[in-house]
Image: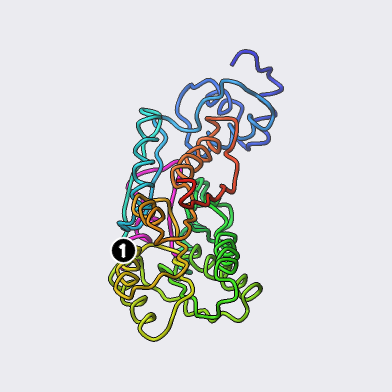
Amino acid sequence: MGSIKRHGLLKVAELSGVSLSTVDRVLNGRGRVSDVKRRKVLTVARALGIRPGLPAPYTGPMIVDVLLSDSATDHFKRLQAAFERQAQRLGAHLTLRHQRWAESAPQQLLDALRKPRSRRHGMIVIAPDTHAVHEALNAIVQSGTPTVLLTSNLTDVQGAVYVGIDNYAAGRSAGRLMSQWIGQRRDAVLLVVNSLAFFAHQERAKGFIDVMAQYAPGTRIIGPVECFDDDELTHTAVAQCLASQTLAGLYDTGSGSLGIQAALTQAGAKPVWIGHEASALHANLLREGVMSLVLDQDPEGQVQASIDYLLHQQGIIDTPPPLPLAMKIVIDENL
């Protein structure tokens, strides 16, 4: 990089805590330098305005660990398809290393976090809200690995970026719309969640309850009832509820829609039903008037923003993605 004057190189060396020869090797791609030192040098050089044409802070393709739970829901299918498209788009420049962990066996996630198969330049993870996970992720972030929390935020993990919608606002939106829809009805409203182990579902449930208490204080909320995105468990929860009372509304923060549909059909009930994610099933239920409204978090946009954030952190692209992402509201009229 012949246009860089010697005093500029000296400044980079001083601020990054390495030798002048190391700075020269990094900026000109000569010899071997550890990823840690390369990242330090390039971070300083970027801050000093030494661009364009800076090399990547590592050799070879960018390796990103993608750690998702083993959910078979439509949302996760959309995430998987979006990751596959991004991998094809970036080709030899990016390696996405997928690992699935079972929600019933969280130790699998901890092992994947603590024992990567080889070096990684970034990580994208969906993780439950537990102390052990917080500790593992904090250690990874502090080691200098750029980390994205996808879909569900963890506020105690400092330095990681959350890529997703504001889930508390999503719950509040559901509550506000539910309160308007049910009007003066004082029948109960059922709140179904996936698992309260995930911060996203905690926030959606809290936002919903807070707004319902404000705008529909006379409405009794049943739940949150954890159904773990399982159609049979969801069917049982809804059917038991309908057997003893009339429901004015139902808000499901996760999946389990086939179970809800079956229970409503069997009981001949038609409460206001608000759910999440713009799937083909939900599109049909909206057209048929069974569902009332769907909140969508745009998993394709989440994947794009996650990868763009990591590319920006590594200095490969100049502009970071705009965060947080916008939530979409889908009804039968805008399908």
What segment carries the magenta color?
104-128
Is residue 151 magenta-colored? no
Amino acid carrying mark 1 in the image? Leu
Residue 89 point in image, percent of width and height: 39, 29
Residue 66 visible to an observer of this rendering? yes
The structure's colour scheme is: rainbow
Compared with 36, 59 (above or below) is above
Compared with 15, 73 (above or below) is below
- In the displayed image of the protein, which residue is found farthest to the top? 2
Q: In this orientation, which residue lies closer to the viewer: 286 or 5? A: 286
Q: Is residue 44 left or right of residue 221?
A: right
* Mark 1 nearby-residue class (10 Å; few <14, some 14–19, many ≥20): some
Which quadrant holds the N terminus? top right
Q: In this orientation, which residue lies closer to the viewer: 233 or 14? A: 233
Residue 142 visible to an observer of this rendering? no
Q: Which residue is mark 1?
A: 258
Residue shown at 30% from the left, 62% from the top: 102
Residue shown at 36% from the left, 72% from the top: 227
Residue shown at 41% from the left, 59% from the top: 289
Residue 244 point in image, percent of width and height: 39, 86
Is residue 126 magenta-colored? yes
Residue 174 point in image, percent of width and height: 55, 63
Q: In this orientation, which residue lies closer to the viewer: 132 or 228? A: 228
Q: How many marks?
A: 1
Residue shown at 60% from the left, 41% from the top: 322
Q: Quadrant of residue 290?
A: bottom left
Compared with 168, 224 (above or below) is below
Residue 30 point in image, percent of width and height: 48, 21
Compared with 217, 1 (above or below) is above
Q: Is residue 92 left or right of residue 323?
A: left
Looking at the rendered structure, the secondary structure element under dot 1 is helix
